[in-house]
Image (cartoon, grey):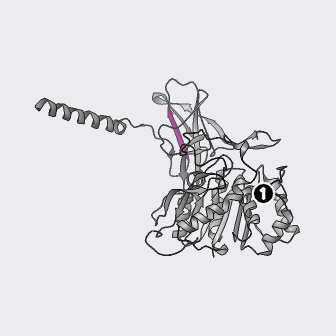
Amino acid sequence: MRKFILAAVAACFSLAANAQQALWSGETVVSPDIHPDNTVTFRFKAPKAVTVQVTGDFLPATLVDVPGRDMKMEAPGVANLKEGKDGVWEYTTEKPLDPELYSYSFIVDGLKVMDPANVYMNRDVASVTNIFIVSKNKGDKGDIYSVNDVPHGTVSRTWYNSPSLNMNRRLTVYTPAGYETSKQKYPVFYLLHGAGGDEEAWIALGRTAQILDNLIATGKAEPMIVVMTNGNAWQDAAAGESPRGMVPPTMGGAGTQNVKPAAFELSFPEIVSFIEKTYRVKADKKNRAIAGLSMGSFHSENISKYYPDMFNYVGLFSGAMVGDGGMGNQSSPVYSNFDSQMATQFAKKPALYYIACGKTDFVKQGVDQLRAYLTEHNYPFEYKETDGGHIWRNWRIYLSDYAPKLFK
């Protein structure tokens, strides 16, 4: 018996040692190192490497071809690190960085790798990058995107049934601070992702919870529920969360060819119905908003005009279309009768029709065409233009600008 007890004790110590090994094997290199003047140093320990580079959106952008289109879009720049003591390579930004959330990764002898000294990461479709935040003053972009000492909302993942898409599907839902302890009803903001994204995109890359927590706490935005959908009609959930297994994330998906045109747009009332049965919400048009980026912008435009009594606030971030938008497919009622649908929508006087786009965004031509169309027909809208292109940095700005305009 004594031998058994000793063996059991030894096993426990062994398990404890294994459990603690991550604690003692931490990376000693500091990276990124944000200095008081907001310059940033990146470090990577690789004694045997020949070249080490850093690529990220804190560097001047480069232009690359858009696959399948005769146009270019912005891509992160690249900078070389210099090897120093003990095989640690370094690069320091030439000037201080503006307040912002930045993403980056390293390229070591041609292989893209993560920063082993930085545990903070985001996934965008199939790409994973490290992130860091720079802030100078309270209330700047970096501060709004950070977790601050304010009341925090709750982020949950929940499933609803979609009879029209013949599957159970997942939503990410933000409820504001105090939701669980009150009997109050809240307005609802439906927030849609872009092509290749999913219901995780806005909460992770878009920093939705942090932005809403901070805007609500400072009185700049009304307390609201934010519903982040999965707009891929062939997909039930984000990569790795589907009952079908860990399907690699792509810009398209298996079975896409079998999805009917506008399937997601047509099924949207199922989401609204589920939310209004499940959460304490104000279930009327004046307390519903919708917005999306890129593909989600097209979805928001189409859903809001096809269901003109559903949303009082409409936001189009980096995407818009006139008519069939070049889809060449008007077999769905969502894409047909554009003029009459728009006339009906604006006759019902939405409280806000908001459009935003970057100056160098490759979709800006379509955005400008819609703006011209709305102006020609005397349909009121609000337009915000920013520097840069089709990038998350802009979409976080648009969310931070759009949310305070809702439900006033």
Q: Is residue 1 left or right of residue 139?
A: left
Instruction: Find out whether residue 359 is within the magenta segment.
Output: no
Residue nearer the viewer, 224 or 92: 224
**What residue is rendered at 47% in x and 43% in y?**
119
Q: What residue does disc 1 label?
A: 320
**Residue span colored magenta:** 38-59
Q: Residue 187 sits in which quadrant? A: bottom right
Q: Is residue 177 left or right of residue 249?
A: left
Task: Bin the neighbour count of mark 1 within 10 Å (Cα to Cα): few under 14, some 14-19, many 20 and up.
Answer: many
Task: Measuring from the top left, give residue 306's x and y in whole percent.
Answer: 76, 64
Q: Residue 104 sits in which quadrant? A: top right
Task: Measuring from the top left, give residue 174's x and y in whole percent.
Answer: 53, 62
Q: Is residue 320 left or right of residue 242?
A: right
Residue nearer the viewer, 64 or 185: 185
Task: Measuring from the top left, give residue 289's x and y in whole percent.
Answer: 66, 67
**What residue is rendered at 78% in x and 49% in y?**
362
Residue nearer the viewer, 116 or 367: 367
Instruction: Find out whether residue 50 is within the magenta segment.
Output: yes
Which residue of the protein is positioned furthest toward the left in this rendering?
2
Which residue of the protein is positioned furthest toward the right in this rendering?
376
Which quarter of the rendered picture does the C terminus lie within? bottom right
- Residue 353 in sight from this viewpoint: yes
- Residue 294 in sight from this viewpoint: no
